[in-house]
Amino acid sequence: MDSRMILDRIPLQFCEGPFWGNGKMGAVLYVRDDSLCISVDHVKLWELRETLPDEPKAAFQQILQHKTEYLSGDPRYVEDTNIFDDNIGRTRLPALAIELKLPGKVTGFWADTDLQSAQTALKISLEDGSLLCGNIYLDSCVNIFSLELDHAEGGLKVKALGWDLESPKLKVLKSWNYEPCRLEEKENSFCVTQHFGKNQTAVLCGKQIGKENKAVLAVSIDVDELEKEQTLKAAGEKLTAAYLENREHYLKAHEADWAAFWNRSSIEVPNERLQEAFAQEMYKLYCNEREDSMPITLQGIWNPNHRMPAWYGDLHNDLNVQSCYWPAYKTGNVNLVRPYIEYYAAAMPRLEERAWKLFGIKNAIHIPTMMAPDGTGAASEWCFWNTLLGPELFVAVDFVWFYEYSREQDTLRDKIYPFIEKVIHLYEEIAYEKEDGYLHIPFTTSPEVDRDGYMLLADDATFTLSSLHFLCKKMAEYAKILGKDGDRFTKWSERLAPVKTNETGLPVYAGIDVFKSHRHFCQLYPIYPLGEEAHNEVANKSLDTAINQGFLEYAAFSFPYMGIFAARCGRGNMCRTMLEIYCMVFRSRNSFTVNGDPYQNGVLRISDTNAGESSDAFTLESGFFVPTLLCEMFVHRSRDKVWMLMGIPDEWKDCSCKQLVVEGGHCLSIEQTDYQLRRVVLTAGYEEKITLCWKEKKAPKRIFRGREEITCGQKGQCTIFVKTGEEWILEF
């Protein structure tokens, strides 16, 4: 697959330039004041101080008694802080930067990034007619950013930058008494140290050499405690020098690492825009997610150097975090999800403390909507968003996904089972019985559904009930695997109110049907990601009801998210359309997400706010929906059924996928030619009975288990018992 990203206009803003990453370090290039400006970010750039008392204004039971006051922001019941205007505490911090002064005004720009090798060929035209050519990459294995420019005999005029504390966009850093950066320069090298937080330091080291009429620059960044600053400086200087002495060695390892990533799986579709988008988003995935890094935040490793990160750059514990990992699971990269599980499991003591302070419940977990990696709330610990119920359910479902795809019993035993057990216990304690004899959950959320000017909170959100039933079912299964007694999960689930559907399908809350256009679709949670409903009347009615509300209140991610539900209802044309709308409307020049409708495509409601944040603010999850949906179009699982090619549009004559993964760790490669399913290869990841389903009402011509030909196919489906590592082949 030849995958390239070509940027042929001068990138005057952060969301217009080429970008690179290795999970710990990220860089974006843009042009500013006749200079190449390169933001250099690191995942550990966090301010983690709390500037307000670490006590909620009101306990959950008090909030229940004063719901109206709580929703209106009454300071007696919720922290009276405008968290989007006042930078009061925990937040992701901006990147550092380097500037390369150019010998004239930039009049032309060409950046050709080979996504397969994560390397960029650069051409810059200057007003005097001269042309600067170079190559850039950020090493996949070590923290080195490398830039090589031709015809730079005199060397590059490099200026290293910490934070501009006088900038209005960074004034909060000055109010926190941050020190200006310290710059040390030698003949061909530099080192910037930027102190932050209580005792943290970021160290940016760089060195350049001249070689064969070229200037080569190597830049490294690392973050640690202040007392280790000299150690970081020495390590950074040593790494940049070693790289410049043996660039071929580092480049070879870099290329091999990216090749291994791309070889795990692939798709081929007859739609150039969607094929390119798949490659671009998978490139972003591996730039951001690594097994030994940190969980991915809203902007990941690409925070600007000249402003505070949008929305605190936090771990946003709903779909914003969840959907960043869906394509990793589906493309056979479950190992990349490990930091998410590790960090949240390590944060359990703080999450238990939150449950005690807000709910008065011990051995339970409550998770803030906006979170730093240590489990503390981003912005304010106890603001409105961080006192809602629900985020812990999003995370608990993710923990289930990790086991379902990895089948790691040690992780199940040590992290997943105890985590989910404490999440369920929170709801066990706050559930209350009504006249119908069922247990109900009070004051639940279905994100961003508003009524009367406030976020609608009510008992028994479909999202809440369906998640709890799903988690209880899985925990009963996991208890058997671990030799534990899981009957209590089954019994409590039987007492918990069921999700009741009606002629409109799944409601938003018990007794409240979908009544307006909105963006999160959490009423459809049983369809995806839970996979409890698919290709049936409930799924189709629910999807029709959502469609009928229109899309004027959607966000960028809403379109591909809606496409996932379409795939699980067998509506391939809708899948394609939702992807096309996202790709045409909600992407800046370099494919970062654009929030709102700033390019005036006319797909959202016209308002004062839907132009979104400025063009250098973006989130990653919207783009990651693209490869997720494309994988779903080829194959997805619901309960014990694996559905194939159910989301392929009518116009796609030939398409294929290789080594896509479904729950159970089963890998599938599927070929369609001349509009017909031709071949399926399944490699089993787990021993179980599954049913393979396809749209055409025809039986396979031949079925092989290994080299043995067997007979078990029916028209439209085939039920097989698979064992770990077995290969099954269906030919049509």
Image (cartoon, rainbow, N blue to C red):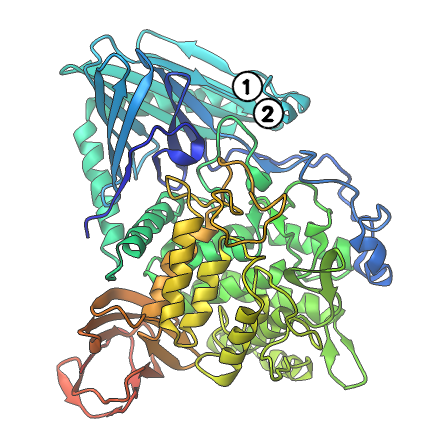
Is residue 334 visible in the rendered image? The answer is no
- Location of residue 278 in the rendering, given as x and y in whole percent from the top left corner: 32, 54
How many numbered marks does the figure carry? 2
> Disc 2 residue type?
Leu
Local SS, label 1: loop
Of pointers 2 and 1, the one earlier in the residue sequence: 1
Q: Is residue 401 left or right of residue 169?
A: left
Quarter that holds the C terminus: bottom left
- Camera-side residue of 491 and 378: 378
Q: Is residue 74 left or right of residue 3?
A: right
Neighbor class of circle 1 (other Cα within 10 Å; few <14, some 14-19, many 20+) is: some
- Location of residue 183 in the rendering, given as x and y in whole percent from the top left corner: 46, 12
Residue pictured at 20% horizontal, 92% vertical: 711
Local SS, label 2: helix
- Camera-side residue of 513 and 635: 513
Q: CA distance from mark 2 to mark 1?
A: 7 Å
Read off the residue under disc 2: 170
Residue pictured at 55% horizontal, 45% vertical: 373
Residue 327, placed above or below residue 14: below
**In contact (CB < 8 Å): disc 2 and disc 1:** yes
Residue pictured at 68% horizontal, 72% vertical: 509
- Location of residue 620 in the rendering, given as x and y in whole percent from the top left corner: 46, 47
Residue 280, placed above or below residue 486: above
Neighbor class of circle 2 (other Cα within 10 Å; few <14, some 14-19, many 20+) is: some
The image quarter in which residue 115 lies:
top left
Read off the residue under disc 1: 164
- Location of residue 1 in the rendering, given as x and y in whole percent from the top left corner: 19, 53
Label drawn at residue 637: none
> Disc 1 residue type?
Asp
Residue 663, placed above or below residue 359: below
The image quarter in which residue 28 lies:
top left
